[in-house]
Image (tube, grey):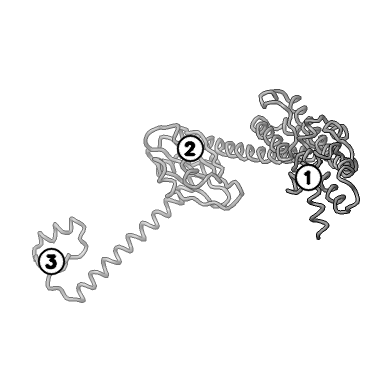
Amino acid sequence: MVTAYDSFDYAKQAMKFGVKEYILKPGKKEETMEAIGRVKEDINRVKKDKEEHDHTVELAKQLFLSKVIHEEDGIDSLQQELYPAMTAGFFLVIEDRNNEHISITAKEIKQWTFDDVIVNQEEGKQVIVLGVRETRDDVHEVSRLIKRIQLERGDHWFIGGGTLVQTVDKLSRSYYEALLDLQKQKGKTEAAELAQGILEKIRDAVQEGNAQTALTNTLLLMESPEKEMMKEELFYLVKQVMDNQRVERPELVIHELNTDHKWYEFIQNSCQRVISHYQSLDNIERTRQWIDKHIHESISLEDMAEQARLSPAYFSNLFKTTTGENVTDYVTKRRLQRAVALLKEQVYSLKEISSMIGYKDPNYFSRVFKKHYDLSPKQFQKVTLKK
């Protein structure tokens, strides 16, 4: 304090408020600088003492955590020294889902809980948190803290939680509960990843019509602890595969697949339908070649379906799906292409050409031709002749 009051009582009162140096005006520069230097040294000494104290306390906390985990002697005395008002405690154990290095400090966690916490993360791959309760007892605090950590740091961490215990001698039990909870979470994830891999194998096998591989992996899935969770995904995966390949699906809903045996039948039936679909595609191509060879004949839908060994309705639908055009339009297109070639030869009469491309009525042939080329067959011949 720099003041003009030259009074002992005044200085005495100032010292009560924490004044370290008392300088009377007008003070000398050297005197003022020396006073500031002494105050600075005092501040640094206090700061250093605090850092050393904090470091000692942190070491004591880490020792307390270690003794609790390993159930060593001296736990009670350390607890009385560090947390004399402690009423309960709990453990969390944290690991990264991808086994990456993780880091979280006690200062961060203290923002999200009423408890004091001790954090051990020496290994880098696993963080151990000991929560120390000195106030109210709330059994839900553990789950709330886990959710808060996941909210703040993302859900890419496994966080195992132990129960809140009332006595120090039971704290180690909370630690092992947290470890067990962590392992269960990791086990569930590994099982889910395994089941996901099996699902993909079933999907690929159904896509290829490979019933043996599909059924083998379906059996594995039905023995998996994740099967109930994966059944719906399997159903819609198979549905998607068949829809993408335009394969007619079995007419059923997922609720009808209420036994493992019905699931096997569903997968086998799906594979058979895929195989039949591929065979039908081959038949469509063969039937198209047959149409080209018999274009001069009067061909009906029934004749073509018989060649493909399919029902007329399914053949018509599959032909459109496979080739992108209606079967009737395809036949008409091929007949008219043949008619154009014959008209250009200038050898045959319209009646002969009509018969040669499968039309019994020349007038009907003329109408169809004009509809597609905007010229009658005779006009087309004249234009061709001029060229």
> Disc 3 designates what residue?
3
In front here: 280 or 298? 298
Q: Which residue is mark 1?
A: 369
| Residue displayed at 83% across by 57% down | 385
Residue 97 lies left or right of residue 82; in this view the side is right
Which one is closest to the eye, mark 2 or mark 1?
1
Disc 1 residue type?
Phe
Which quadrant would the N terminus be assigned to in this image?
bottom left
Q: Report the Cα–Cα distance between label 1 and label 3.
A: 117 Å
Where, quadrant-wise, is the C terminus in this rendering? bottom right
Q: Position of residue 235 (x, y in %)?
A: 69, 32
> From this viewpoint, is residue 113 visible?
yes
Residue 321 lies left or right of residue 169; in this view the side is right
Q: Nearer the viewer, residue 211 or 49?
A: 211
Residue found 69% across the figure and 37% down from its top: 240
Against 81, residue 221 (above or below) is: above
Residue at 53%, 47% (x, y): give it. 127
Left or right, 13 with reference to 47: left
Q: Earlier in the sequence, mark 3 or mark 2?
A: 3
Query: Where is residue 131 drawn, in percent x and y?
Result: 45, 41
Q: Element type at marker 2?
A: strand
Between 363 and 315, the one nearer to me in the picture? 363
**Amino acid type shown at disc 2:** Phe
Residue marked by disc 2: 90
